[in-house]
Image (cartoon, helix red, strand yellow):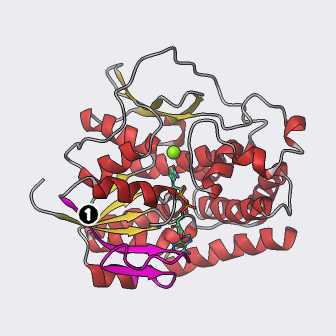
Amino acid sequence: MDGVKRIALLGATGSIGRQAIEVIDAHPELELVAAASGSQPIEGLAPLTQSGGDLTELLQRAEPDLVLNAVVGFAGLAPTMWALEHGVTLALANKESLVAAGELALAARERGGGQLIPVDSEHSALFQCAQLGEPESVVLTASGGPFRGRTRAELADVTREQALAHPTWSMGPKITIDSATLANKGLEIVEAHFLFDLAYDSIEVVIHPPSIVHGVVRFRDGASIAHLGYPDMRVPISYALTYPERAATPVPPLELRTLEFHAPDTETFRMLALAREAGERGGTYPCAYNAANEVAVQAFLERRIGFLDIAALVEDVLGRGDWQPAHDLDELVEADRRARDLVAVAT
Ligand code: NAD
Ligand code: MG
């Protein structure tokens, strides 16, 4: 790497944020120049810090070489757009912003001319495989979450604690619930559509309980390249922060074992099918899907609704509006707010 890379870390107190600090601390060429959290105190973590408020003000002052957006939810939209618009390299963990703002975000990247490097493990895997050629189609793997193999009837009474017990990944609460409903994989289908410019029927999802294969890219000559590794977010974080180099991490070398794959049960896990439908419909359907999901997940975490209500509420919101394309960020924020309001009155 030539010179020091100056990093602004948003969502510094979260699961991704804390692992990112570990990666940055281990590399003298990575310098944390700014850090932000939603509400937790973080003074002293970096020369510039901010808790809450307008994240783009912090970025403006910090003038980073790279923004790692590890905020959870639609709140990550403004810094995603800021980095893309200003041509500052964006290491993106905050998938919600790309799902909600897809076209607007890609247009901003076009204008800004900077790099967008996914941190989401599956997309990091696909991004790495795609260094070898143009993907014809891709496979996203999913662990299946804590409720893999259950029927709808068996999901009616599951608790918050059961939903928060993820079998392979340790993550923040919102994405952990998304992994239990498979909304996380749904969001990732839309994320892959925008990151790799692929039609939805070229994005497949398979259930792979051990979470060793993170993604597969298929090329037009019949070759497929898979990315394998232990489920440890320090690998994709390190890759995004040191790209195009590949730095050492404490993650042990992989020992091969039997790998199993199944088709997902989209009847039981409706959120997966709904995301694909929302993506195919386009416009602000993905934004509405994301917003409705965020509010429903919060209501589930607060024990105000049941597990199956999450998908029911999202389906209802998607069916109720005519989710037309947003021409600018104001229209997008308005669509997000409308979807949130629709769920809020129902919970
Ligand atoms: P988390 O809940 O552990 O942390 C979220 C961070 O965002 C915290 O620092 C919090 O203070 C901050 N935040 C919340 N609301 C904010 C706001 N309004 N303004 C500014 N900051 C705010 O979440 P996480 O698990 O670290 O996930 C972060 C993002 O990364 C999510 O988009 C998630 O989908 C994605 N992601 C996470 C993992 C993982 O392993 N945790 C894997 C892949 C993708
Ligand atoms: Mg992922």
Left or right? Give the position of 291 relative to 238: right
- The correct choice, above or below, for 105 with respect to 143 in the image is below
Q: Residue lying furthest left in this view?
A: 2
Residue 67: image quadrant is: bottom left
- Residue 217 spot, x, y in % from top left: 39, 31
Of residues 240 and 313, which is closer to you in this image?
240
- Residue 225 spot, x, y in % from top left: 35, 26
Of residues 231 and 126, which is closer to you in this image?
231
Residue at 79 percent of width and 68 percent of height: 343
Q: Residue lying furthest top in this view?
A: 258
Disc 1 crowd rating (10 Å Cα; few below 14, some 14-19, many 20+) is some
Q: How many marks?
A: 1
Quadrant where the image shows the C terminus: bottom right
What's the amino acid at mark 1? Gly
Q: Is residue 31 magenta?
A: yes
- Residue 270 spot, x, y in % from top left: 75, 43
SS label for mark 1: loop
Q: Which residue is mark 1?
A: 114
Residue at 40 percent of width and 51 percent of height: 119
- The correct choice, above or below, for 320 with respect to 61 in the image is above
Q: Is residue 100 magenta?
A: no
Residue at 42 percent of width and 65 percent of height: 105
Left or right? Give the position of 20 relative to 154: left
Of residues 148 and 34, which is closer to you in this image?
34
Q: Magenta segment, which residues?
A: 29-56
- The correct choice, above or below, for 326 with respect to 150 in the image is below
Mark 1 residue CB less than 8 A from any atom of ligand 1: no
- Residue 328 spot, x, y in % from top left: 49, 77
